[in-house]
Amino acid sequence: MQEQMRIRAKELLTGGAVQRVLGWKKGDFPYNPEPAFFTTECELDDLVYDRFCAANLSGYMVEANKEDGKTLVFLKPCDTYSFNQLTKEHRVSRDKAWIIGVGCEGNAAVEEMQETGLLERCKVCTKTEHKVFDELIGEDVKTREEGDRFEQVSDIEKMPPDERFDFWQGQLSRCIRCNACRNVCPACNCRKCVFDSGKYDTEQKANVTTFEEQMFHIIRAYHVAGRCTDCSECSRVCPQGIDLHLLNRKVIKDVNELYGEFQAGNDVETPGPLTDYDADSDADPSVVYERG
Amino acid sequence: MLKIARENLPALFAAIADTAALYLPIRKGAVNYAQWSDGADVDLDTLKTIASPKDFFLPQSETLYTAALAGNKIQLEAEPFVDEPFVVFGVKGCDVRGIEILDKVYLSDPVDRFYEARREKGTIVSMACAEPQATCFCKSFGVDAANPAGDVVTWMADGNLFWEAQTEKGKKLTEMLSNLLTSAERSPVSSQQKDIRQKIDTLPYSVGLPLDQFKSERLLELFDAPQWDSLYRTCLACGTCTFICPTCQCYDIKDFNTGTCVKRYRCWDSCMYSDFTLMAHGNPRKTQKERFRQRFMHKLVYYPDKNDGEYSCVGCGRCVNKCPASLNIVKVIKSLGVNADV
């Protein structure tokens, strides 16, 4: 499959159909291939694709979109949801991308150089189809295990408030505000993040108090509400191993319950539930207050 | 050489904590340095804490002074220096070297008094790395993981913690613990040291990094190297590498409006951030390429140029482990070292 990808990428690049290739480049160790832009045929000999190629490349297309010509990008099924969402938000244009959908066997979780099984997102994977592509290479392997992705959210919802607070405090107090979660997130695509702007008091380079630290993640979860595709890149890259995807899943669960099932990035046409509120047919906002 | 049985360590920790705040690697979801209290899940087996222990001396955020309105005057109140003794236990050789690198910046003229106070009050108990990992490359930067610096150095071997004071501060701590420590043979330590050094010699990054290419005579050549154009391309511009790094030392000074007063604080800065070195006139480093380059030029060229050739990387490998885009200093060293005209 990797060989097929290299051959096809070389064809498209040398044929002039695309000006660059966005894929994964061989790392020093098996576990650390890096996202990379390839611009020459010989560089493409270093293109790799295996279970360690977990990085969702959609977000890089925002920058690639500003360059001349087309960019060939390899997307796993779940990555295509992010690409659709970016298209819908006019952050990438479909005609500047040549998308090769690649089959996915699930991504490896890595801890201290050791493969520790599948990433959590792959264990609850429901995104087995490429939602946008020009061509496909390779087959998908089912990685979903028993259980659904909202199980842990439901468990947390059932906790008494104090226990729930302790749970999140235990998680979020580890945050070092490195912004990896924000910067890797395809939905966090504001040109200037409110947390980086010197114009407002919101700029916080340091977590002056735990209050600031905790607010950051909640604000981020709300900013991506209805737009988060649940790619879980935030949790994958967090150096402290904080289960950030749980915050997003809680919001997704609420959105589903209040406005009906919705999967961000499923297509580029369906209006988002939070940008398409209809007073007659949608839930009364007071429902949120009642739920506490 | 002294020792204490591993199972008696809680008593040792309690004795230290009686006289000073004790910080050591504790598992709370992840393993980080945290203050010891009875029942804490101490983890001395995990080789690397996620963040380095540098923030005991250079905190991620610290208030410098507070300004408040008193009538029609502004009242300034300086933040007091740290005045209580503390002990950081279990610091690995790379991280001790990291603190020595900070010393050269913060203790040279003009001396940073906040940092100096913490260094005076803090005692470092280091620990040799019984099981170095594939991402370790401390040897490339001249750190001996089998014999780390520190006020006291320890080795965990044969079910005992071996203990040796190396400085006056270390001797003072040792005296205080004399009823818990017993004298010991050096041989288990010597054999562990041999074992560690052998293991390190087999690690992929331990030998052969083309570091000799990074010298101040080549500053402009390295600065203008074409490799930077591709190296930075998939950097996410997050601050993970800089915030977990034991030697990253840049800070920013900002005001925090509490509503009733203004706290002027300093916090870690990251050259990866878009507002790094942003000044009233603009930013001399406008693109991510320039910011990315700054990080590595600082560690491999600028700092050594000012400090007798000593690099400001200690080879702890945290960035190798944690960069979300799998970029790291080793990849940069290899890339820039390869095409050099020797």
Image (cartoon, coloured by chain):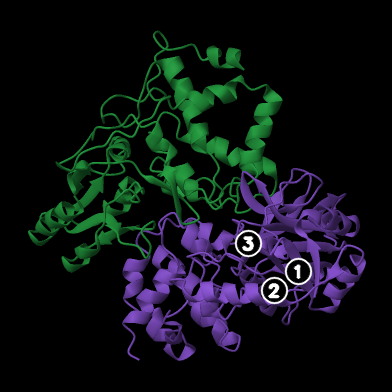
Amino acid at circle 2: Val
Residue B132 % position (x, y): 55, 66
Residue drawn 52% across and 72% down? B199
Q: Are marks 1 and 2 in contact (CB under 8 Å)?
A: yes
Provide the residue designation for mark 3.
B52
Tell me how far mark 1 sits from mark 2, CA to CA: 7 Å
Q: Which chain is green?
A: A
Amino acid at circle 1: Phe
Label 3 resides on the chain identified as B
Provide the residue designation for mark 2.
B189
Residue B206 % position (x, y): 48, 75
Looking at marks 2 and 3 on the same chain, the residue that comes earlier in the sequence is marked by 3
Label 1 resides on the chain identified as B
Q: Is residue A181 above or below residue B251?
A: above
Quadrant for the C terminus of chain B, please.
bottom left
Q: Is residue B222 above or below residue A71?
A: below
Element class at badge 1 = strand
Q: Is residue B274 visible?
A: no
**Front position among marks 2 and 3:** 2
Tell me how far mark 2 sits from mark 3, CA to CA: 25 Å
Q: Is residue A157 visible?
A: yes
- The reply, left or right, for residue A135 in relation to residue A111 is left
Q: Which chain is purple?
A: B
Tell me, yes or no, whether dots 2 and 3 are on the same chain.
yes
- The reply, left or right, for residue A242 in relation to residue B117 is left
Query: Viewer-proximal residue, A275 or B269?
Result: B269
- The reply, left or right, for residue B205 in relation to residue A104 is right
Quadrant for the N terminus of chain B, please.
bottom right
Amino acid at circle 3: Ser
- State the mark number for residue B162: 1
